[in-house]
Image (cartoon, rainbow, N blue to C red):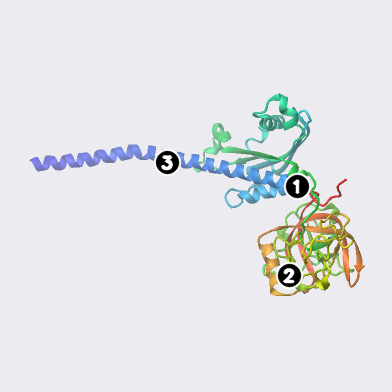
Amino acid sequence: MKQITTQHNKHREKGQSLVEVALFLPIFIIILAGLIEVSQLVITQNRVSQAARVSSRFGANGGQNEGMMLVALNTVTQTLLMDAGNWDMWVVRGTVNDAGTAFSEWEFTHVYGISNTVGFTNVNEVDIQTEILTDLQRNITPNNYTTLVGGLRIVGLYTLHDVESILGLESMPWLQGFYSVRGLSYMRQTGETVVQTNGCSAFPIAVHEAIRSVNPPGSGGNPYPNPNDFANPNPPTYNSFIYHRPDIPLAQAREGDVYRIWNGFGSGNFGWLLWNTGEQGSGTTLDGSVTWPGNSTDYTNAGNCGGGTCVTPLFPHRVRGYVNPDDTSDITLHVGDWVPANTGVSNASYLRDTLDGHISLNRTLRLIVWGESRQQGSNGAYRISGFAVFRLKGYSLSGNWILAEFVRWDTSCGQPIP
């Protein structure tokens, strides 16, 4: 009898445990799902905020609105949905008045999205302007507004992103705002980014100011190169440049326009550069100068001066950096300066490997834009009319051309200083 009672009690305990599990399990699942849901929101918020910061940094370094949008999207492309219906982005640009009390110039430009995010209708431009100004004035007494805030230029990104709930809760009207996250970041354009420096560094390629962007394959003018003509192993397709516009002159270029630039001094529209006439215009010199980050400002001792005469009186040794051929005491690249051409083109594997590295790393390269050329002894020279930033996308050493994507004009250096 005792054994039967014991077994009965054990069955009761098991049954009680099952009931307790049945009661607790839904609550546990809800708590677990809630933790995952909140964690997803926190992570998404961090990613959106990071995208806004990276985009603002790009803008502070001279990037244009379209480029800021692309940088933000590239930052989150592997982790968040990119549907334009889930995003709205605005680029913010402004200049504070001299008193430091308001914005004398203000831009609030919608650059991405279809105005479909939950928070779009509640975006108040004046509130955002006030928020940024308040942040600039934080921990500063009004007496110091003029000296510490007055005249500041800022650029930033304001973005909204609608998060998809794991539990589908974003469809509930009273929770929609909870699943719409915002990111706001701006950066001050301090003297480091807006004050012109004495000279530029540059990559040893000069492109003509009259170049025009490529046309679709098979069309007239300057058509996109055949994939078989590329030296790099994975040539991009014409349609991969979604922001490209055909037949656009360089003077009207926007970020994303693609240019196929032909080589050949006197007949082409781009040329390899030789930073000073003390160096040989050869493939060996070119191989050395295309290595990142370039050697246009390299004035370290490169050996004895050829022929006993140094190319510049500033150094008692041979240098690899730029020396103005018309004024050998000038070693800074400016608009209006002449730069010698490098007539040696190398097909060496080193040069190809180096160019492939620039392409694979998506590097931005500051190139010289030229408007005039001249013969100079047995070589030529290009006169600088400006500086522009490009990304190298392809090339053919045998065909003597490069394919480059325009990023922006660069007036942060190399401008004539009064």
Q: Which mark is residue 64?
A: 1
Q: Is residue 218 left or right of residue 28?
A: right
Residue that badge 2 annotates: 287
Disc 3 residue type? Answer: Leu
Q: Quadrant of the C terminus?
A: top right
4 w.r.t. 226: above or below: above
Q: Earlier in the sequence, mark 1 or mark 2?
A: 1
Residue 221 x %, y % = 86, 64
Query: Can the viewer see residue 27?
Result: yes
* Alpha carbon distance from label 1 to label 2: 32 Å
Q: Rate crowding at label 2 as few (under 14), some (14 to 19) or many (20 or more) other CA atoms within 10 Å.
A: many
Q: Rate crowding at label 3 as few (under 14), some (14 to 19) or many (20 or more) other CA atoms within 10 Å.
A: few
Disc 2 residue type? Answer: Asp
- Say which of marks 1 and 2 sits in front: 2
Residue 105 x %, y % = 79, 34
Disc 1 residue type? Answer: Gln
Q: Nearer the viewer, residue 384 or 220?
A: 384
